[in-house]
Every structure is written in structure tokens, then in C-alpha cells.
Amino acid sequence: MSSARLQPTACAMLSSTIKHHCLRPVRNGVVFSTTNYHSRTNRPLSVSMSASAPPTPLEICVKASITVPNKLGDCPFCQRVLLTLEEKHLPYDLKLVDLANKPEWFLKINAGGKVPVIKLEEKWVADSDVISQSLEEKYPQPPLGTPPEKASVGSKIFSTFIGFLKSKDPNDGTEQALLDELSSFNDYLKENGPFINGKDVSAADLALSPKLYHLEIALGHYKNWSVPDSLPYVNSYMKNMFSKDSFTKTRALPEDVIAGWRPKVVG
């Protein structure tokens, strides 16, 4: 589960319609599709684009599902980039890559074999941090930047979640470490929310919310654990982020999240 695995519109008057196509396999275990790949219908998808939007959809390689053919996999770092594209209303074409059988063409564009990777100005760019910043610089509208003093809010939640998930000892302090981080985030949201940068979603939310989605599903499945009701601002934050259209379009299937974390849990 890392951004290293490659397994994932400033609105103006200009409008473009991107039609949904059924995912279709191609050679080397890669699947191509347009946006709205989670849709189960063939209805057209309208996307409002800024005048600075790319003339053709941006190519992005992401992890493929290991439970259902032709679906997005469980990488939260891939979802972060897809969320950025959705929130900026930028058209994109997915390439779903089977990480258990990485094709040669993929290793040629990214020798490290990591995901996500996106093609910007004829160059393939890896690492979700770098990609998100590059998209913000190249397509600044709508702005998603987070002030530096707020960018690290909630940043320790993911590592403490992993520690608790992997723990076999209920008294080793890993649960309390996670609760401490969630409590700190709850206090922050109470004073500064509803989102990390106030009333508007920013890049920090797009980075954190996929990790919280994994936390909710994995801990619920493997430990029958959920964020306590005593942390209402965290619960409200998760509900608000998970219900956004951009999130529902780009989230992994719960069964993929469960399968993805299984090696961490069972060793």
C-alpha cells in the first residue's frame, strides 16, 4: 500500500462531453477507459473544463483491482491523484495495470514500477505528491493548494492506523496511538473545519480522505473497529468527503481494500 505501487476544471463556459466507454482489456494486462469508469451504465458524462484544460485526456496509470476484472484497485495514492483530476474537472484516460504482472511497456516508462504515474507534457511523472503539485501548477483553477502550515494536518493518522491494523497485542498501545491522532484531528476540525483549509476542500483533504476510507474498511473488517462517536467532527468529515461525487467515482471496491490489507494482517 504505497504510492510506489503502480497496480489509479476550473469551471468556465467551455463545456465538453466525454462519453463513457466499457473497459476493454488490451495487451500486456492493461485496461484503458475514460473517466467515470465506476459507472455501471453507458450514460454520457458531461465534464466542464477550463480553457486551459488539456486538448486530449491525460493518461494515468493506476493499480487494477485484484478481485473484479476491469476495475480500479485499492491504492489510496492513486485515488488522491484521481480526486485531484476530478475536482479540477480535467479529462483523463485510465490504464489499469496488473501489479502482479507488470507489463514491459510500463516498466519502460517507470523503471521503479510504482503507481500512480501520469503523462504531463509528453513526460511520465511518478509520485502522488509530485503529480498533485504539478497539476496544481499547470491547472491552477479551481485552486486546491493548502497553506504550508495546514498541509501536515492529520498526516500521522495513516501510519498509526497501519500500526494498529498489524498489531496482535491489544495492550501494545497502537490503538491508543491512533485514537490520539484522530482526537487531535477532531479538535482541529472543531476549530477550523469542516475541511482542513476551512470551508473549501483542498489538496490536503484529497490526500487524507482515501487513507481514512482504507482505515474505515480495513479496521471494520479485521478488528470490528470504527471511529468512536466521541469524535463527531472526524466522523462528519469522513461522511462529507466520502459522499462527494469525485470520491464515489474514484474509490476502490471494499473487497479490494480488504484484500489489499490482508498480507499486513495475516503476515
Image (spheres, rainbow, N blue to C red):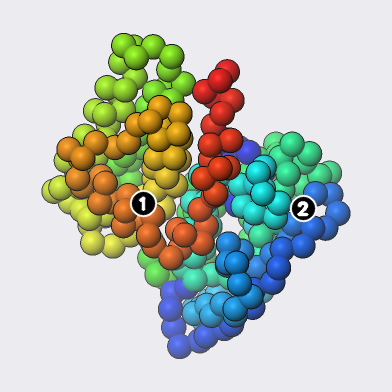
Image coordinates of residue 243 in percent, x first then y, are 37, 60
Position of the N terminus by quadrant: top right
Near-viewer residue (189 or 135)? 189
Q: Residue 219's image quarter? A: top left
Name which quarter of the figure residue 19 lies in: bottom right
- Specify whether 184 is left or right of 138: left
Q: How far apart are marks 1 and 2 (CA)?
A: 29 Å
Look at the numbered disc 2 and give the secondary structure of its residue.
strand
Q: Position of residue 205 (x, y in %)?
A: 36, 51
Q: In this view, does 246 lie above or below 159?
A: below
Look at the numbered disc 1 and give the secondary structure of its residue: helix
Q: Which marked residue is nearer to the observer: mark 1 or mark 2?
A: 2
Give x and y (percent) for residue 97.
72, 48
The spot of residue 146 in percent (x, y) is 33, 53
Quadrant position of residue 3:
top right
Q: Residue furthest right?
A: 27
Quadrant in which the C terminus is drawn: top right
- Taking the image as shown, residue 38 lies to the left or right of residue 193, namely right
Disc 2 residue type (three-letter) = Val
Name which residue lies at 56% across and 42% down.
Answer: 255
- Disc 1: which residue: 205
Label 1 sits on what residue type?
A: Asp
Q: Which of marks 1 and 2 is nearer the N terminus?
A: 2
* Residue position for label 2: 30
